[in-house]
Image (cartoon, helix red, strand yellow):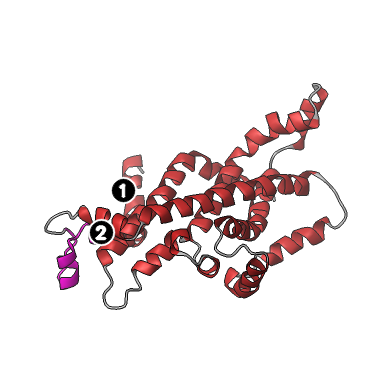
């Protein structure tokens, strides 16, 4: 079968899935660009009578969206950096080192993934209040790390196991120290898995709502999920054009992270499937 005909068949088969995935984004962008009077009239069209770019300006100024965007960036970056700093050495130790209780530790990490943050939110709230860190973005970031480290370690462990230890042994024979061999041989080969893990960690912190609702109290510390939820919980009328404009802006940083690290995605996701 010619390649062009085969590609056409593939696109026809995949088109329903593509439409389902793009439909929410199409509604979001169309509503964000629709004038307010057309949204409340109930007679909205996919293509509005004019593109209401002022929706983004009004939303940004009226709800102090820039502060929430910066808060989410701080929480996402701090969570990602701390999670990677802790998870990479832990995953390396689980793959390369033999120590007593290793199997029990791996099982413990797996069991922790069965608990939802919602189940633990009351206990974590009392803990944060007890140490005087309520309404702190750093405290929220550390809590996010606690939930993401176990997943990150398991994800990195699968990929690290596919990197031959003989490469590091060869570096040792050339006179390199253990740390130098890890930095120059192991770390570059592990970069795809670290990039994928960083993406999932950043997105998890970026989208989390329940724990942020319990820990953050003042509106100037709100992250994007809390700010967007506040927009959609009006007492008399929900301004959907502002909600969709805020949602569209909130997706941009995640899209940038994906585009920046996409060349590592396939390698990082499939590498751990070779050897677990």
Total numbered labels:
2
Q: Which stretch is magenta? A: 28-47
Q: Residues within 10 Å of mark 1 (few under 14, many from 20)?
A: few
Residue 272: x %, y % from top left:
64, 48
Instruction: Please determine whether, in this image, residue 132 is positioned above or below residue 195.
Output: below
Residue that extends furthest to the top in the rendered view of this protein:
174
- Residue drawn 79% across the image and 21% down it: 174
Residue 113 is situated, as x and y percent measured from the top left of the image, at 65, 65
When asked about the image quadrant of residue 250, the answer is: bottom left
Q: Classify mark 1: helix, strand or loop.
A: helix
Check if residue 108 falls in the magenta segment: no
Residue 128: percent from left, percent from top: 64, 66
Q: Is residue 188 above or below residue 153?
A: above
Q: Secondary structure at mark 2?
A: helix
Residue contact at pointers 2 and 1, CB within 8 angstroms:
no
Q: Is residue 138 visible?
A: yes
Q: CA distance from mark 2 to mark 1?
A: 33 Å
Which residue in the protein does label 2 denote?
32
Task: Work out whether residue 111 or residue 17 is closer to the camera in this orientation and state it.
Answer: 111
Which residue matches tag 1?
8
- Residue at image location 57% in from the left, 49% down from the top: 78
Q: Is residue 197 visible?
A: no
Which is more toward the observer, 265 or 249? 249
């Amino acid at each position: 079968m010619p390649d062009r005909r085969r590609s056409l068949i593939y696109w026809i088969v995949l088109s329903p899935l593509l439409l389902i995935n793009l439909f929410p984004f199409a509604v979001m962008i169309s509503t964000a660009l629709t004038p307010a009077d057309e949204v409340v009239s109930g007679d909205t069209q996919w293509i509005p009578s004019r593109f209401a770019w002022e929706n983004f300006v009004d939303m940004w100024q009226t709800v102090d969206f820039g502060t929430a965007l910066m808060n989410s960036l701080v929480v996402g970056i701090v969570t990602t950096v701390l999670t990677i700093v802790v998870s990479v050495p832990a995953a390396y130790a689980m793959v390369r080192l033999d120590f007593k209780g290793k199997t029990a530790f791996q099982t413990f990490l797996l069991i922790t993934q069965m608990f939802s943050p919602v189940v633990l939110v009351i206990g974590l709230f009392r803990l944060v209040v007890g140490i005087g860190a309520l309404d702190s973005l750093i405290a929220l970031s550390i809590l996010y790390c606690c939930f993401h480290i176990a997943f990150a370690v398991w994800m990195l462990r699968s990929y690290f196991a596919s990197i031959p230890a003989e490469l590091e042994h060869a570096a040792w024979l050339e006179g390199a120290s253990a740390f130098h061999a890890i930095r120059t041989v192991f770390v570059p080969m592990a970069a795809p898995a670290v990039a994928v893990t960083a993406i999932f960690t950043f997105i998890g912190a970026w989208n989390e709502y329940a724990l942020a609702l319990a820990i953050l109290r003042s509106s100037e510390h709100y992250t994007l999920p809390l700010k967007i939820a506040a927009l959609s919980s009006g007492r008399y009328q929900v301004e959907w054009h502002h909600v969709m404009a805020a949602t569209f802006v909130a997706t941009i940083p995640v899209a940038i992270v994906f585009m920046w690290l996409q060349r590592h995605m396939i390698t990082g996701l499939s590498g751990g499937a070779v050897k677990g």
